[in-house]
Amino acid sequence: MQILVLVKQVPDTATRIKIDADGKDIQRDGLTWVLNPYDEYAVEEALLLKELHGGTVTVLTLGPAKADEALRSALAMGADEAVRVDGQPADALQAGWALAQAAKALAPDLILCGKQAVDDDQAEVGVLVAEFLNLPQVTVAVSLSVDPAAHSGQAKREVEGGVQQIAFSLPAVVTAQKGLNEPRYPSLPGIMKAKRKEITVQAADLGIAAGVELVRLTPPAPRKAGTLLKDLPGADAGRELIRLLHEDAKAI
Amino acid sequence: MPETGPDYLQIERLLTDEERSIRNVVAEFVAAEVAPSIGQHWLDGTFPIGLVAKMGELGIFGPTLPPEYGGAGISDVAYGLIMQELERGDSGLRSFASVQSALSMYAIWRFGSEVQRRRWLPKMAKGQAIGCFGLTEPDAGSDPGAMRTRARRDGSGWVLDGVKRWITNGTLADVAVVWAREEGGAILGFLVERETAGFTAKDVHTKASMRASHTSDLMLDGVKVADEARLPEAKGLGAPLACLTQARFGIACGVVGAAMDCFNEALAYTGQRTAFGHPLAGTQLVQERLVDMLSRLTAAQLTALQLGRLKEAGELRYAQVSLAKRNNTRAALEVARMGRELLGGNGITTEYRAMRHMANLETVDTYEGTYEIHTLIIGRDLTGLDAFSAPAQNSGA
Ligand SMILES: Cc1cc2nc3c(=O)[nH]c(=O)nc-3n(C[C@H](O)[C@H](O)[C@H](O)COP(=O)(O)OP(=O)(O)OC[C@H]3O[C@@H](n4cnc5c(N)ncnc54)[C@H](O)[C@@H]3O)c2cc1C
Ligand SMILES: Cc1cc2nc3c(=O)[nH]c(=O)nc-3n(C[C@H](O)[C@H](O)[C@H](O)COP(=O)(O)OP(=O)(O)OC[C@H]3O[C@@H](n4cnc5c(N)ncnc54)[C@H](O)[C@@H]3O)c2cc1C
């Protein structure tokens, strides 16, 4: 089975983001970059399916040369091949298009990706790739099984108040939610092998007009200082806390 | 990504991508799997044995060995960074890895036969077999040449008799590397398997240091082994000492992690804690403490890195390793003591980390050559004069 995993390099959520002077982008230098955490679930799922059914796992990213690091992280986890389409998409539509064109050429049986990237949180790319390739799609999957011989799969998604069970035919696109699996750590031999792996680089096909324009990035408003209940005896502080939670915060 | 610093002098820039990746993976592993429960293990006097298989999967045992023996062929600096991150968790965890990789696997790799290597190294790399290294005895610690354990020829094999003390992983080990003196001859090394008749191990239960680690007595009572169990290339005290040099390198790097953990903890704690109406970190005395801690650990960090680079170049001398083991361990111990102090009453509990690190580092200061023994090794290297034996004997000679 040929499994393709779409991955993205994102800033570590623990790092503090600064916005460029022109308000169009974040300052990219000096950040810690990581493989998008939801993509880790997708990579892990691909590796588990490969262990079960055989085949190869290819990881694909769209981005600058720096994004090779995200590919190498996936290779270190155990992916077999890595492809980077080089380019800067203007929006999710362009990203979805470029990835769909690259994916088409690889003709996978299954495409996996994270349900969203934690940098811009659009949750659109997997969906767009499925649409551009005219494939069935299951988003936000928490469990997945496939039957390669029957060209079919089953997935579960969590919805408000319950679980949806979905049957679909292969090839298909599935986006991964937390809980799908427990991503493995890259192993040391994996890291050393990944370092020597050739990454295929090709120019991105951005042959579709962007659908939206980014007008401006602004940082969130600074958080208001918390309220500290001091100088009250324990029981009174408790009562005051409950009153504030109930009346002001309306949390209880 | 968990904390991998402090890195005040941007030493990060001197690392390769793989070295960073390897360090980050181990840091993630330690933050997720070790840090939450290690304080309790320490209190209970238990080693988190469930982590051994995972560490094996990660590939952190014998990682500098070539792949055919289960290693990953990583750089020595990367190895040092693994030790750093393990010891950021707990010195007991790093001790486990040191004994497995730098003492037991290294002994088999360097002094073993090809059959012994093939039999043990891949399994040990996976964590499916655990090793221990029996050199110290009740009456021979700093002076291992005075060991009493004897190896007597018996037909084509050997009989071993003696007691080893303070042996890390002794009760966990599937295979013990046992050093014994041939009657009237040189020190030899043997691989003694757990089930061998006459071989028993018993843990020391009275430790107030290194509590998340098993430390054991090994009893060898007429233990019969075949000559195939002898490490064929090990002839004389130089063999176990060569293993110690490997482990000391790892220790010099490892203790930096414990110091970093204590520094980060103290910096965060004193920034939040108020006394006399302002944060502790805003007082000159506390700032001086924090700066001392940072200065010492940064010097240790640079020492560790340069040690690794020398090792990679094949130029590392054992006296240089002594300098680094001696200085870095004492620096880490002092950083931990300062961190402990800055945490006030909280600092004596295992809910915080400084006290546990501090108590552990007392062992690290003693094992693998005490502070004084390294002083004498470096002193001999500097002066060409051996000051190990007592002055009375020196003057008599
Ligand atoms: C938790 C733990 C784990 C250990 N794990 C292992 C292990 O896995 N394998 C193993 O073989 N050993 C192990 N050891 C043993 C360790 O290496 C020894 O404890 C160490 O070498 C010191 O020996 P000793 O305890 O006999 O002290 P001694 O040699 O009796 O030393 C006592 C004191 O005298 C000082 N001293 C000794 N000689 C001189 C001198 N000539 N001049 C000045 N001062 C001197 C020492 O520096 C020390 O301060 C471990 C020890 C501990 C505590
Ligand atoms: C086992 C144990 C038993 C105890 N028993 C008792 C008891 O019976 N009765 C009782 O009342 N208390 C008791 N204590 C409490 C003990 O007296 C306090 O822990 C101690 O006074 C320190 O206070 P703290 O822990 O709040 O530390 P902190 O006051 O938070 O101090 C933390 C660190 O900051 C330093 N520091 C504080 N202020 C400054 C400053 N202005 N400039 C520079 N440095 C500063 C301190 O020296 C310390 O290193 C006990 C504590 C322990 C650990």
Image (cartoon, rainbow, N blue to C red):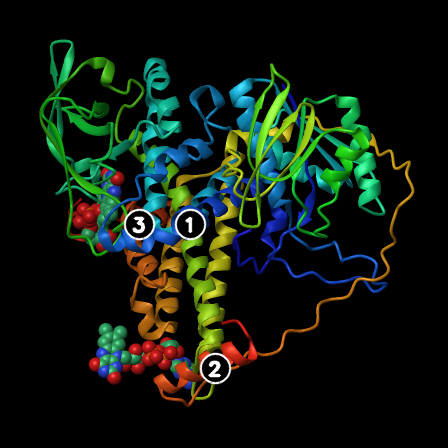
Q: Amino acid at mark 2?
A: Arg
Q: Residues within 10 Å of mark 3 (few under 14, many from 20)?
A: some
Q: Are marks 3 and 2 in contact (CB under 8 Å)?
A: no
- Tag 3, which chain? B
Q: How far separated are the C-alphas under marks 2 and 1? A: 59 Å
Query: In the figure, residue A62 lies in which quadrant?
Result: top right
Question: Which is nearer the eye, A202 or B199?
Answer: A202
Q: x%, y% of residue A99?
A: 78, 34
B243 left or right, relative to A78? left
Q: Nearer the viewer, mark 1 or mark 3?
A: 1
Asked if ligand 1 lies within 8 A of label 1, the reply is no
Sequence order check: which comes first, mark 1 or mark 3?
1
Question: Could you tell me which quadrant the C terminus of chain B lies in?
Answer: top left
Q: Please give the name of the residue rendered at 67% of the width and 23% of the height, measured from the top-left corner.
A: A170
Question: Which is nearer the eye, B397 or B270?
Answer: B270
Question: Which is nearer the eye, B112 or B2?
Answer: B2
Evaluate whether label 1 is on the same chain as label 3.
yes
Any mark on residue A243, and which?
A: 2
Any mark on residue B342, and which?
A: none
Q: Please give the name of the residue rendered at 70% of the width and 41% of the height, measured from the top-left corner.
A: A8
Judging by the rendered image, the residue that carries numbered circle 3 is B376
Q: x%, y% of residue A40?
A: 59, 39
Asked if ligand 1 lies within 8 A of label 3, the reply is yes
Judging by the rendered image, the residue that carries numbered circle 1 is B324
Q: Nearer the viewer, mark 3 or mark 2?
A: 2
